[in-house]
Amino acid sequence: MTKKWIWVGTTLICVTLWYLTREKPQRFHGEGTIVEFIRQGQWLSVFGGPLAKRTELIAMEQFEPFQPGLSLDDASRIYGQADRIVVAEHGAEYAEYHNQYGRIRLGEEESADGWVGHALYFYPYDRRPEVFLRGAIVSHLRSQPKKEVVMLFECGFEQPFMHVVITRGDLTEVVWEDNRDLVRRSDTSQCIEK
């Protein structure tokens, strides 16, 4: 047997073992206006039903008056001069503001293919997940994981409108995507993954 075939065989065995040992998704019935939860490792996907309001999933008032989808100029025009401007890697720029609940960054991020997104980043002062996430979601969190990411989906969208990052039990970052930056499902009445 040649070295090439030994390498191919070893690679196939490694890939097969990786596939067989990775954690399978666990599905849980929803509660209230949440139709389903899916847990896979550190990821918890939360699928809102057709009548679900964002306020039934999270404490939306913590963002007020800020919204995603704004350039630096738009943010300045709507909310006034930023507390500071943050320039990140790869040319991303953010206007940073503060409200009574935490730090908020609005800005523009460009991907390698030229797509520009306008997410809102939120860093809360009170980092307890139960202060931001509603009870039905909190009850599905793991106890004290190293890291957990809650992805919140609205009915009719393939991508989550929000990611909530929890590190060692503390809510460390929220990323709220503008709906214009998300992909809709071909069947907009479909709320969950098939």
Image (cartoon, rainbow, N blue to C red):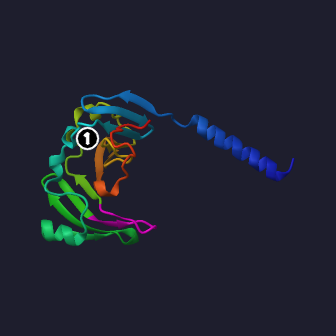
* Above or below 14: residue 94: below
Instruction: Give amino acid for label 1.
Output: Pro
Q: Position of residue 70 (x, y in %)?
A: 24, 64
* Left or right: 7, with 153 as reference point: right
Depth check, front residue: 152 or 6: 152
- Magenta range: 107-118
* Residue picked out by circle 1: 129
Position of residue 14 in the picture relative to residue 162 (left or right): right
Residue appearing at x 23%, y 42% in the figure: 128
Residue in the image at 22% along x and 43% along y:
54
Residue 79 position (above or below residue 153): below
- Which residue occupies the foreground of this view, 37 or 62? 37
Residue 86 placed where, x, y %?
28, 69
- Residue 146: percent from left, percent from top: 40, 42
Find residue 93 and report its horizontal and vertical position in percent.
30, 70
Residue at the outermost front position:
187
| Outermost residue to the right | 1
Residue found 42% across the figure and 40% down from its top = 42
